[in-house]
Amino acid sequence: MATIVQRPKLSLLERSYFPAILGGLWITIKHFIKMLFGQTKVTMQYPEQKWDSAMPEWYRGAPTLVKDEHDRERCVACQLCEFICPPRAITIKPGELPGDNRWSKVEKYPEKFDIDMIRCIYCGLCEEVCPEQAIFLRKDYSITGLTRSEMVHDKEKLYELGGVMHGLVHKWNEKK
Amino acid sequence: MPSLDLFLQPEIFLVWTSALKTLVILGVVLTMVAYSVWAERKVSAFIQDRIGPNRVGWAGLIQPIADGVKLLLKENFVPGGVNKFFFSIAPSLAMIPAILVLAVLPFGSSLFGVPMVIANLDIGVLWVFAVSSLGVYGIVLAGWSSNSKYPFLGGIRSSSQMISYELSLGLSVVPVFMITGTLNLGEIVQYQVDNGWMVFPAWFQSGGGLLEITTDNGSMFGLNLGQSLLWIPMMVSFVIFLIAMFAETNRVPFDLPEAEQELVGGYHTEYSSMRFALFFLGEYAAMIAGAGVIVTLFLGGWSLPFIPDGSQGWFWGLVNIGTFFAKVAAIIFFFLWVRWTLPRFRFDQLMKLGWYVFFEVALLNIFLTAGILAYLQS
Protein backbone atom coordinates (compact mmCIF):
# COMPACT_ATOMS: atom_id res chain seq x y z
CA MET A 1 0.00 0.00 0.00
CA ALA A 2 1.36 3.33 -0.92
CA THR A 3 2.01 5.72 1.93
CA ILE A 4 1.45 9.34 1.22
CA VAL A 5 3.58 11.66 3.33
CA GLN A 6 1.84 14.98 3.75
CA ARG A 7 4.19 17.89 3.29
CA PRO A 8 3.84 20.22 6.25
CA LYS A 9 2.21 23.55 5.45
CA LEU A 10 4.76 26.20 6.38
CA SER A 11 3.70 29.62 7.48
CA LEU A 12 5.25 32.71 5.94
CA LEU A 13 7.47 33.19 8.98
CA GLU A 14 8.70 29.60 8.77
CA ARG A 15 9.37 29.96 5.06
CA SER A 16 11.59 32.97 5.74
CA TYR A 17 13.96 30.56 7.58
CA PHE A 18 14.55 33.09 10.35
CA PRO A 19 13.00 31.08 13.22
CA ALA A 20 14.93 27.96 12.17
CA ILE A 21 18.19 29.91 11.84
CA LEU A 22 17.76 31.53 15.25
CA GLY A 23 16.85 28.14 16.75
CA GLY A 24 20.01 26.63 15.29
CA LEU A 25 22.15 29.47 16.58
CA TRP A 26 20.63 29.02 20.03
CA ILE A 27 21.47 25.31 20.06
CA THR A 28 25.09 25.82 19.01
CA ILE A 29 25.71 28.67 21.44
CA LYS A 30 24.33 26.48 24.25
CA HIS A 31 26.90 23.82 23.42
CA PHE A 32 29.62 26.49 23.20
CA ILE A 33 28.78 28.01 26.59
CA LYS A 34 28.50 24.63 28.29
CA MET A 35 31.90 23.67 26.97
CA LEU A 36 33.34 27.05 27.94
CA PHE A 37 32.30 26.54 31.55
CA GLY A 38 33.46 22.94 31.59
CA GLN A 39 30.02 21.38 31.95
CA THR A 40 30.40 19.15 28.89
CA LYS A 41 31.77 15.67 29.34
CA VAL A 42 34.47 15.12 26.73
CA THR A 43 36.34 12.00 25.67
CA MET A 44 39.34 10.71 27.60
CA GLN A 45 42.50 12.68 26.78
CA TYR A 46 44.54 9.63 25.84
CA PRO A 47 48.21 10.08 26.53
CA GLU A 48 47.52 11.94 29.78
CA GLN A 49 44.62 9.76 30.92
CA LYS A 50 44.63 6.02 30.37
CA TRP A 51 42.14 3.28 31.03
CA ASP A 52 44.80 1.03 32.61
CA SER A 53 43.04 0.89 35.97
CA ALA A 54 39.83 -0.24 34.31
CA MET A 55 41.50 -3.05 32.37
CA PRO A 56 40.17 -6.56 33.11
CA GLU A 57 42.36 -9.32 34.54
CA TRP A 58 42.09 -11.32 31.34
CA TYR A 59 43.35 -8.51 29.10
CA ARG A 60 45.56 -9.82 26.29
CA GLY A 61 48.44 -7.36 25.89
CA ALA A 62 52.02 -7.95 24.83
CA PRO A 63 53.43 -11.49 25.36
CA THR A 64 56.23 -11.60 27.93
CA LEU A 65 58.52 -14.13 29.54
CA VAL A 66 58.55 -14.65 33.31
CA LYS A 67 61.04 -15.93 35.86
CA ASP A 68 60.08 -18.03 38.88
CA GLU A 69 60.67 -17.28 42.56
CA HIS A 70 64.23 -18.71 42.41
CA ASP A 71 65.12 -16.26 39.64
CA ARG A 72 65.22 -19.16 37.16
CA GLU A 73 63.86 -18.52 33.70
CA ARG A 74 60.86 -20.75 33.33
CA CYS A 75 61.23 -21.21 29.59
CA VAL A 76 62.86 -24.54 28.68
CA ALA A 77 63.08 -23.78 24.95
CA CYS A 78 60.63 -26.51 23.94
CA GLN A 79 59.64 -24.27 21.00
CA LEU A 80 55.93 -25.17 21.23
CA CYS A 81 55.03 -21.48 21.16
CA GLU A 82 57.22 -20.96 18.11
CA PHE A 83 55.38 -23.76 16.32
CA ILE A 84 51.87 -22.68 17.29
CA CYS A 85 52.31 -18.94 16.71
CA PRO A 86 49.92 -18.19 13.79
CA PRO A 87 51.83 -15.21 12.36
CA ARG A 88 55.20 -16.84 13.19
CA ALA A 89 56.26 -13.93 15.34
CA ILE A 90 58.38 -16.00 17.76
CA THR A 91 61.95 -17.08 17.02
CA ILE A 92 63.79 -19.23 19.58
CA LYS A 93 67.36 -20.41 19.53
CA PRO A 94 67.65 -23.20 22.16
CA GLY A 95 70.83 -23.76 24.11
CA GLU A 96 72.08 -26.46 26.52
CA LEU A 97 72.51 -25.70 30.20
CA PRO A 98 76.08 -26.52 31.36
CA GLY A 99 76.53 -29.40 33.82
CA ASP A 100 77.65 -27.22 36.72
CA ASN A 101 74.54 -25.11 36.57
CA ARG A 102 72.16 -25.43 39.51
CA TRP A 103 69.30 -26.18 37.11
CA SER A 104 71.28 -28.43 34.78
CA LYS A 105 68.61 -31.12 35.16
CA VAL A 106 66.32 -28.86 33.02
CA GLU A 107 68.80 -29.39 30.14
CA LYS A 108 67.61 -26.63 27.80
CA TYR A 109 67.20 -22.89 27.96
CA PRO A 110 66.52 -20.29 25.24
CA GLU A 111 69.76 -18.72 24.07
CA LYS A 112 67.76 -16.26 22.03
CA PHE A 113 64.03 -15.55 22.32
CA ASP A 114 62.64 -12.89 19.94
CA ILE A 115 59.04 -11.85 19.48
CA ASP A 116 58.42 -9.61 16.48
CA MET A 117 55.75 -7.22 17.78
CA ILE A 118 54.94 -6.08 14.25
CA ARG A 119 53.77 -9.63 13.53
CA CYS A 120 52.21 -10.52 16.88
CA ILE A 121 48.42 -10.66 16.76
CA TYR A 122 47.93 -10.91 20.53
CA CYS A 123 45.99 -14.20 20.16
CA GLY A 124 47.40 -15.75 23.33
CA LEU A 125 48.03 -19.21 21.81
CA CYS A 126 51.65 -19.10 23.05
CA GLU A 127 50.44 -18.62 26.59
CA GLU A 128 47.88 -21.41 26.17
CA VAL A 129 50.33 -23.89 24.71
CA CYS A 130 53.23 -23.27 27.12
CA PRO A 131 53.70 -26.38 29.34
CA GLU A 132 56.01 -24.54 31.72
CA GLN A 133 53.87 -21.43 32.34
CA ALA A 134 56.76 -19.32 31.07
CA ILE A 135 55.03 -16.99 28.62
CA PHE A 136 52.14 -14.74 29.59
CA LEU A 137 50.23 -11.98 27.86
CA ARG A 138 50.52 -8.94 30.09
CA LYS A 139 48.71 -5.59 30.00
CA ASP A 140 51.15 -3.59 27.88
CA TYR A 141 49.30 -2.44 24.76
CA SER A 142 51.22 0.62 23.62
CA ILE A 143 54.17 -1.03 21.86
CA THR A 144 55.81 1.59 19.67
CA GLY A 145 59.12 2.09 17.92
CA LEU A 146 60.73 4.10 15.18
CA THR A 147 62.42 1.18 13.39
CA ARG A 148 61.51 -2.42 12.63
CA SER A 149 64.39 -3.70 14.75
CA GLU A 150 63.09 -1.71 17.69
CA MET A 151 59.80 -3.56 17.39
CA VAL A 152 61.44 -6.96 17.91
CA HIS A 153 61.42 -7.77 21.62
CA ASP A 154 64.49 -9.76 22.62
CA LYS A 155 64.88 -11.91 25.72
CA GLU A 156 66.03 -9.06 27.93
CA LYS A 157 63.07 -6.88 26.99
CA LEU A 158 60.63 -9.79 27.42
CA TYR A 159 61.86 -10.51 30.97
CA GLU A 160 61.80 -6.80 31.78
CA LEU A 161 58.13 -6.65 30.77
CA GLY A 162 57.26 -10.03 32.32
CA GLY A 163 58.90 -9.90 35.73
CA VAL A 164 58.55 -12.71 38.27
CA MET A 165 55.64 -15.14 38.58
CA HIS A 166 55.20 -17.15 41.79
CA GLY A 167 53.87 -20.73 41.83
CA LEU A 168 51.37 -22.19 39.43
CA VAL A 169 48.94 -19.91 37.65
CA HIS A 170 45.39 -20.85 36.81
CA LYS A 171 45.57 -19.61 33.24
CA TRP A 172 42.39 -21.18 31.85
CA ASN A 173 40.19 -18.14 32.03
CA GLU A 174 37.20 -18.77 29.77
CA LYS A 175 37.23 -15.11 28.73
CA LYS A 176 40.83 -15.19 27.63
CA MET B 1 66.96 70.48 17.43
CA PRO B 2 66.83 70.70 13.63
CA SER B 3 66.17 66.98 13.23
CA LEU B 4 63.00 67.08 15.32
CA ASP B 5 61.71 70.09 13.39
CA LEU B 6 62.22 68.15 10.19
CA PHE B 7 60.02 65.34 11.53
CA LEU B 8 57.32 67.81 12.50
CA GLN B 9 57.00 69.45 9.09
CA PRO B 10 53.46 68.70 7.92
CA GLU B 11 54.35 66.64 4.83
CA ILE B 12 57.07 64.59 6.51
CA PHE B 13 54.93 64.17 9.62
CA LEU B 14 52.14 62.75 7.44
CA VAL B 15 54.54 60.33 5.72
CA TRP B 16 56.08 58.81 8.81
CA THR B 17 52.89 58.66 10.84
CA SER B 18 51.13 56.96 7.91
CA ALA B 19 53.98 54.49 7.53
CA LEU B 20 53.89 53.75 11.24
CA LYS B 21 50.11 53.33 11.24
CA THR B 22 50.33 51.02 8.22
CA LEU B 23 52.95 48.84 9.88
CA VAL B 24 51.08 48.63 13.17
CA ILE B 25 47.75 47.88 11.50
CA LEU B 26 49.33 45.21 9.29
CA GLY B 27 50.93 43.61 12.32
CA VAL B 28 47.74 43.68 14.34
CA VAL B 29 45.57 42.39 11.51
CA LEU B 30 47.95 39.59 10.47
CA THR B 31 48.12 38.48 14.10
CA MET B 32 44.34 38.59 14.21
CA VAL B 33 44.23 36.51 11.02
CA ALA B 34 46.46 33.86 12.57
CA TYR B 35 44.44 33.80 15.76
CA SER B 36 41.09 33.78 14.02
CA VAL B 37 42.20 30.48 12.46
CA TRP B 38 42.90 29.29 15.98
CA ALA B 39 39.55 30.71 17.14
CA GLU B 40 37.79 28.97 14.28
CA ARG B 41 39.16 25.63 15.39
CA LYS B 42 38.40 26.30 19.04
CA VAL B 43 34.85 27.54 18.40
CA SER B 44 34.07 24.65 16.09
CA ALA B 45 35.41 22.23 18.69
CA PHE B 46 33.42 23.77 21.53
CA ILE B 47 30.23 23.81 19.49
CA GLN B 48 30.75 20.14 18.65
CA ASP B 49 31.56 19.18 22.27
CA ARG B 50 35.25 18.67 21.58
CA ILE B 51 38.33 20.35 23.10
CA GLY B 52 40.13 21.45 19.94
CA PRO B 53 43.82 22.29 19.61
CA ASN B 54 45.48 21.90 23.02
CA ARG B 55 48.94 20.48 22.33
CA VAL B 56 51.08 23.41 21.12
CA GLY B 57 51.26 25.87 23.97
CA TRP B 58 48.59 26.56 26.56
CA ALA B 59 45.16 25.81 25.00
CA GLY B 60 46.96 25.47 21.65
CA LEU B 61 47.81 29.16 21.52
CA ILE B 62 51.09 28.59 19.64
CA GLN B 63 49.27 26.44 17.06
CA PRO B 64 49.06 29.23 14.40
CA ILE B 65 52.86 29.62 14.50
CA ALA B 66 53.34 25.86 14.17
CA ASP B 67 50.91 25.83 11.23
CA GLY B 68 52.77 28.68 9.59
CA VAL B 69 56.12 26.93 9.94
CA LYS B 70 54.63 23.73 8.55
CA LEU B 71 53.21 25.55 5.51
CA LEU B 72 56.53 27.33 4.88
CA LEU B 73 58.47 24.08 4.93
CA LYS B 74 56.12 22.16 2.62
CA GLU B 75 56.86 21.65 -1.05
CA ASN B 76 55.41 24.37 -3.27
CA PHE B 77 54.08 22.01 -5.90
CA VAL B 78 52.99 23.25 -9.33
CA PRO B 79 50.99 20.61 -11.21
CA GLY B 80 51.68 20.06 -14.90
CA GLY B 81 49.32 21.75 -17.34
CA VAL B 82 48.56 24.83 -15.25
CA ASN B 83 48.86 28.33 -16.62
CA LYS B 84 51.92 29.20 -14.55
CA PHE B 85 51.62 32.99 -14.61
CA PHE B 86 48.02 33.18 -13.42
CA PHE B 87 48.53 30.19 -11.14
CA SER B 88 51.26 32.13 -9.30
CA ILE B 89 49.56 35.50 -9.05
CA ALA B 90 46.10 34.23 -8.06
CA PRO B 91 46.93 33.72 -4.35
CA SER B 92 48.26 37.28 -4.06
CA LEU B 93 45.17 38.59 -5.84
CA ALA B 94 43.04 36.92 -3.20
CA MET B 95 45.07 38.28 -0.28
CA ILE B 96 45.88 41.87 -1.33
CA PRO B 97 42.35 43.34 -1.75
CA ALA B 98 41.40 42.17 1.72
CA ILE B 99 44.34 44.06 3.20
CA LEU B 100 43.84 47.16 1.02
CA VAL B 101 40.34 47.60 2.47
CA LEU B 102 41.91 48.20 5.87
CA ALA B 103 43.49 51.43 4.59
CA VAL B 104 40.26 53.42 4.80
CA LEU B 105 38.80 51.95 7.98
CA PRO B 106 38.91 54.37 10.94
CA PHE B 107 40.16 52.00 13.64
CA GLY B 108 40.28 54.65 16.32
CA SER B 109 39.50 58.32 16.93
CA SER B 110 42.87 59.97 17.32
CA LEU B 111 46.07 59.46 19.25
CA PHE B 112 48.21 62.53 20.13
CA GLY B 113 46.18 64.45 17.54
CA VAL B 114 46.92 61.97 14.75
CA PRO B 115 43.71 60.58 13.21
CA MET B 116 43.64 56.82 13.52
CA VAL B 117 42.93 56.02 9.89
CA ILE B 118 45.59 55.33 7.28
CA ALA B 119 43.88 57.06 4.34
CA ASN B 120 41.04 59.43 5.13
CA LEU B 121 39.35 59.18 1.73
CA ASP B 122 36.16 61.07 0.93
CA ILE B 123 35.06 58.10 -1.16
CA GLY B 124 35.87 55.60 1.59
CA VAL B 125 32.92 53.29 1.07
CA LEU B 126 33.33 53.25 -2.71
CA TRP B 127 36.97 52.27 -2.17
CA VAL B 128 35.87 49.42 0.08
CA PHE B 129 33.41 48.06 -2.47
CA ALA B 130 35.72 48.56 -5.45
CA VAL B 131 38.70 46.88 -3.85
CA SER B 132 36.99 44.07 -1.96
CA SER B 133 35.17 42.98 -5.13
CA LEU B 134 38.57 42.46 -6.77
CA GLY B 135 39.11 39.57 -4.38
CA VAL B 136 36.88 37.43 -6.58
CA TYR B 137 39.46 37.66 -9.39
CA GLY B 138 41.94 35.72 -7.30
CA ILE B 139 39.44 32.92 -6.90
CA VAL B 140 38.27 32.88 -10.52
CA LEU B 141 41.84 32.96 -11.85
CA ALA B 142 42.91 30.22 -9.45
CA GLY B 143 40.02 28.05 -10.60
CA TRP B 144 40.64 28.66 -14.26
CA SER B 145 44.45 28.48 -14.34
CA SER B 146 44.58 25.21 -12.36
CA ASN B 147 43.39 23.31 -15.47
CA SER B 148 41.44 20.90 -13.29
CA LYS B 149 37.69 20.31 -13.03
CA TYR B 150 37.04 20.95 -9.33
CA PRO B 151 38.89 24.27 -9.14
CA PHE B 152 37.16 25.26 -12.36
CA LEU B 153 33.73 24.56 -10.87
CA GLY B 154 34.78 26.55 -7.79
CA GLY B 155 35.78 29.49 -9.93
CA ILE B 156 32.50 29.41 -11.87
CA ARG B 157 30.52 29.27 -8.66
CA SER B 158 32.47 32.19 -7.30
CA SER B 159 31.59 34.40 -10.25
CA SER B 160 27.93 33.37 -10.18
CA GLN B 161 27.91 34.08 -6.47
CA MET B 162 29.40 37.51 -6.97
CA ILE B 163 26.78 38.69 -9.45
CA SER B 164 24.03 37.64 -7.05
CA TYR B 165 25.19 39.29 -3.84
CA GLU B 166 27.09 42.35 -5.07
CA LEU B 167 23.98 44.35 -6.02
CA SER B 168 22.24 43.92 -2.69
CA LEU B 169 25.53 44.60 -0.88
CA GLY B 170 25.82 47.96 -2.59
CA LEU B 171 22.14 48.87 -2.36
CA SER B 172 21.84 47.98 1.30
CA VAL B 173 24.29 50.69 2.38
CA VAL B 174 22.69 53.47 0.32
CA PRO B 175 20.27 54.33 3.21
CA VAL B 176 23.29 54.88 5.47
CA PHE B 177 24.61 57.54 3.09
CA MET B 178 21.17 59.08 2.75
CA ILE B 179 21.04 59.57 6.51
CA THR B 180 24.63 60.62 7.11
CA GLY B 181 25.07 62.50 3.82
CA THR B 182 28.68 61.42 3.36
CA LEU B 183 30.77 58.58 1.94
CA ASN B 184 33.69 59.29 4.25
CA LEU B 185 33.92 56.43 6.77
CA GLY B 186 35.36 58.71 9.45
CA GLU B 187 32.42 61.11 9.13
CA ILE B 188 29.95 58.20 9.20
CA VAL B 189 31.46 57.13 12.52
CA GLN B 190 31.35 60.72 13.81
CA TYR B 191 27.65 60.86 12.87
CA GLN B 192 27.07 57.72 14.92
CA VAL B 193 29.01 59.18 17.84
CA ASP B 194 26.65 62.16 17.82
CA ASN B 195 23.39 60.47 16.91
CA GLY B 196 23.61 56.92 18.15
CA TRP B 197 24.72 53.81 16.32
CA MET B 198 22.84 52.86 13.20
CA VAL B 199 21.48 49.71 14.82
CA PHE B 200 21.19 51.25 18.30
CA PRO B 201 20.08 54.89 17.98
CA ALA B 202 19.63 55.50 21.69
CA TRP B 203 21.12 59.00 21.99
CA PHE B 204 21.00 62.19 19.96
CA GLN B 205 22.09 65.80 20.06
CA SER B 206 19.15 67.90 18.99
CA GLY B 207 15.96 67.94 21.00
CA GLY B 208 12.53 66.60 20.15
CA GLY B 209 12.89 63.34 22.00
CA LEU B 210 10.07 61.11 23.12
CA LEU B 211 12.03 60.08 26.15
CA GLU B 212 15.14 61.86 27.18
CA ILE B 213 17.85 62.04 29.81
CA THR B 214 20.30 64.88 29.28
CA THR B 215 23.90 64.11 30.18
CA ASP B 216 26.61 66.58 31.16
CA ASN B 217 28.22 66.86 27.70
CA GLY B 218 25.01 68.01 26.07
CA SER B 219 24.00 64.85 24.24
CA MET B 220 20.73 63.28 25.25
CA PHE B 221 20.20 59.64 26.03
CA GLY B 222 16.83 58.28 25.11
CA LEU B 223 14.61 57.93 22.10
CA ASN B 224 13.68 60.48 19.52
CA LEU B 225 10.99 60.10 16.92
CA GLY B 226 13.14 60.52 13.81
CA GLN B 227 15.79 58.06 14.83
CA SER B 228 13.29 55.51 16.03
CA LEU B 229 11.60 55.65 12.62
CA LEU B 230 14.94 55.43 10.79
CA TRP B 231 15.91 52.49 12.95
CA ILE B 232 13.56 50.24 10.91
CA PRO B 233 15.26 50.67 7.52
CA MET B 234 18.63 50.62 9.27
CA MET B 235 17.94 47.17 10.72
CA VAL B 236 16.86 45.92 7.28
CA SER B 237 20.06 47.36 5.79
CA PHE B 238 22.13 45.82 8.54
CA VAL B 239 20.70 42.32 8.07
CA ILE B 240 21.08 42.43 4.27
CA PHE B 241 24.58 43.87 4.51
CA LEU B 242 25.61 41.24 7.06
CA ILE B 243 24.29 38.38 4.93
CA ALA B 244 25.89 39.81 1.78
CA MET B 245 29.15 40.11 3.72
CA PHE B 246 28.98 36.37 4.43
CA ALA B 247 28.79 35.83 0.66
CA GLU B 248 31.53 38.38 -0.04
CA THR B 249 33.96 36.64 2.31
CA ASN B 250 33.00 33.13 1.10
CA ARG B 251 31.86 32.01 4.52
CA VAL B 252 29.34 29.31 5.29
CA PRO B 253 26.43 29.30 4.38
CA PHE B 254 27.77 30.80 1.12
CA ASP B 255 31.12 29.04 0.80
CA LEU B 256 30.19 27.58 -2.59
CA PRO B 257 33.58 28.18 -4.26
CA GLU B 258 35.24 26.03 -1.60
CA ALA B 259 32.58 23.47 -0.74
CA GLU B 260 34.95 20.81 0.66
CA GLN B 261 32.27 18.14 0.57
CA GLU B 262 31.45 18.60 -3.12
CA LEU B 263 34.50 20.11 -4.83
CA VAL B 264 37.41 18.56 -2.88
CA GLY B 265 38.93 21.96 -2.00
CA GLY B 266 37.19 24.11 -4.60
CA TYR B 267 39.36 26.76 -6.22
CA HIS B 268 42.46 25.93 -4.14
CA THR B 269 42.45 22.17 -4.74
CA GLU B 270 45.67 22.27 -6.76
CA TYR B 271 47.53 24.61 -4.43
CA SER B 272 50.01 23.67 -1.74
CA SER B 273 52.41 25.26 0.71
CA MET B 274 52.48 29.06 1.02
CA ARG B 275 50.29 29.61 -2.05
CA PHE B 276 47.54 27.67 -0.35
CA ALA B 277 48.28 29.55 2.87
CA LEU B 278 47.82 32.87 1.06
CA PHE B 279 44.31 31.84 -0.01
CA PHE B 280 43.59 30.68 3.48
CA LEU B 281 44.91 33.84 5.12
CA GLY B 282 43.24 35.97 2.46
CA GLU B 283 39.88 34.48 3.40
CA TYR B 284 40.40 35.37 7.06
CA ALA B 285 41.82 38.79 6.24
CA ALA B 286 38.72 39.45 4.13
CA MET B 287 36.65 38.37 7.12
CA ILE B 288 38.41 40.86 9.38
CA ALA B 289 38.12 43.65 6.79
CA GLY B 290 34.43 42.81 6.27
CA ALA B 291 33.82 42.81 10.00
CA GLY B 292 35.60 46.17 10.16
CA VAL B 293 33.29 47.59 7.49
CA ILE B 294 30.19 46.29 9.30
CA VAL B 295 31.39 47.77 12.58
CA THR B 296 32.19 51.12 10.94
CA LEU B 297 28.95 51.45 9.04
CA PHE B 298 26.43 50.09 11.51
CA LEU B 299 27.90 49.51 14.96
CA GLY B 300 29.40 52.91 15.65
CA GLY B 301 33.02 52.19 14.69
CA TRP B 302 35.37 52.97 17.55
CA SER B 303 32.72 54.65 19.71
CA LEU B 304 31.09 53.53 22.91
CA PRO B 305 28.33 55.53 24.60
CA PHE B 306 29.70 58.08 27.11
CA ILE B 307 33.34 57.27 26.30
CA PRO B 308 35.17 60.41 25.07
CA ASP B 309 37.36 60.32 21.96
CA GLY B 310 41.11 60.76 21.58
CA SER B 311 41.00 64.55 21.90
CA GLN B 312 40.48 64.03 25.65
CA GLY B 313 43.87 62.32 26.09
CA TRP B 314 45.87 59.41 24.76
CA PHE B 315 44.26 56.98 27.18
CA TRP B 316 40.83 57.46 25.60
CA GLY B 317 42.45 57.20 22.16
CA LEU B 318 43.72 53.76 23.10
CA VAL B 319 40.33 52.83 24.56
CA ASN B 320 38.73 53.77 21.22
CA ILE B 321 41.16 51.58 19.28
CA GLY B 322 40.52 48.72 21.69
CA THR B 323 36.77 49.20 21.29
CA PHE B 324 37.03 48.97 17.51
CA PHE B 325 39.00 45.73 17.60
CA ALA B 326 36.74 44.28 20.29
CA LYS B 327 33.72 44.94 18.07
CA VAL B 328 35.53 43.38 15.10
CA ALA B 329 36.34 40.32 17.21
CA ALA B 330 32.69 40.05 18.23
CA ILE B 331 31.57 40.12 14.59
CA ILE B 332 34.20 37.51 13.71
CA PHE B 333 32.88 35.31 16.50
CA PHE B 334 29.44 35.67 14.94
CA PHE B 335 30.89 34.60 11.57
CA LEU B 336 32.40 31.49 13.17
CA TRP B 337 29.26 30.76 15.14
CA VAL B 338 27.14 30.87 11.98
CA ARG B 339 29.61 28.67 10.13
CA TRP B 340 29.19 25.86 12.62
CA THR B 341 25.41 26.20 12.69
CA LEU B 342 24.06 26.54 9.17
CA PRO B 343 24.27 24.17 6.21
CA ARG B 344 25.49 25.43 2.84
CA PHE B 345 23.07 27.00 0.37
CA ARG B 346 22.72 25.49 -3.04
CA PHE B 347 23.96 27.49 -6.01
CA ASP B 348 20.47 28.23 -7.37
CA GLN B 349 19.13 28.98 -3.88
CA LEU B 350 21.82 31.61 -3.41
CA MET B 351 21.04 33.24 -6.77
CA LYS B 352 17.32 33.22 -5.99
CA LEU B 353 17.95 34.68 -2.57
CA GLY B 354 20.12 37.41 -4.06
CA TRP B 355 17.96 38.33 -7.02
CA TYR B 356 14.41 37.64 -5.80
CA VAL B 357 14.65 38.67 -2.16
CA PHE B 358 17.56 40.86 -1.14
CA PHE B 359 17.70 42.95 -4.30
CA GLU B 360 14.03 43.93 -3.99
CA VAL B 361 14.13 44.41 -0.24
CA ALA B 362 17.23 46.61 -0.50
CA LEU B 363 15.58 48.71 -3.23
CA LEU B 364 12.37 49.13 -1.25
CA ASN B 365 14.44 49.98 1.78
CA ILE B 366 15.98 52.94 -0.06
CA PHE B 367 12.51 54.32 -0.87
CA LEU B 368 11.38 53.71 2.70
CA THR B 369 14.37 55.65 4.03
CA ALA B 370 13.76 58.45 1.56
CA GLY B 371 10.11 58.64 2.63
CA ILE B 372 11.00 58.79 6.32
CA LEU B 373 13.65 61.45 5.71
CA ALA B 374 11.19 63.52 3.67
CA TYR B 375 8.57 63.18 6.42
CA LEU B 376 11.07 64.24 9.09
CA GLN B 377 12.16 67.31 7.12
CA SER B 378 8.64 68.54 6.39
Image (cartoon, helix red, strand yellow):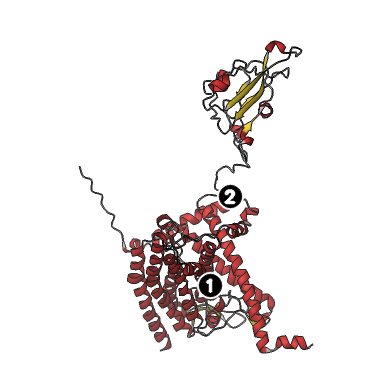
Taking depth in this image into account, of B70 and B161 the one nearest to the observer is: B70
User: Horizontally, is B348 left or right of A157 in the view?
Assistant: left
- B168 over B157 or under it: above or below: below
User: Horizontally, is B46 left or right of B83 in the view?
Assistant: right
User: Horizontally, is A6 left or right of B327 in the view?
Assistant: left
**Chain of the residue under the numbered disc 1 shown in the image:** B
Q: CA distance from mark 2 to mark 1?
A: 40 Å
Q: Quadrant of residue B252?
A: bottom left
Q: Nearer the viewer, mark 2 or mark 1?
A: 1
The outermost residue toward the front is B80
**Chain of the residue under the numbered disc 2 shown in the image:** A
Secondary structure state at the residue bearing disc 2? loop
The residue that label 1 is drawn on is B96
Q: Which mark is residue B327?
A: none
Number of residues whose C-alpha sits closer than 10 Å to that of mark 2, classed few (under 14), some (14–19) or many (20 or more) = few
Q: Amino acid at mark 1?
A: Ile
Q: Amino acid at mark 2?
A: Gly
Q: Which mark is residue A38?
A: 2
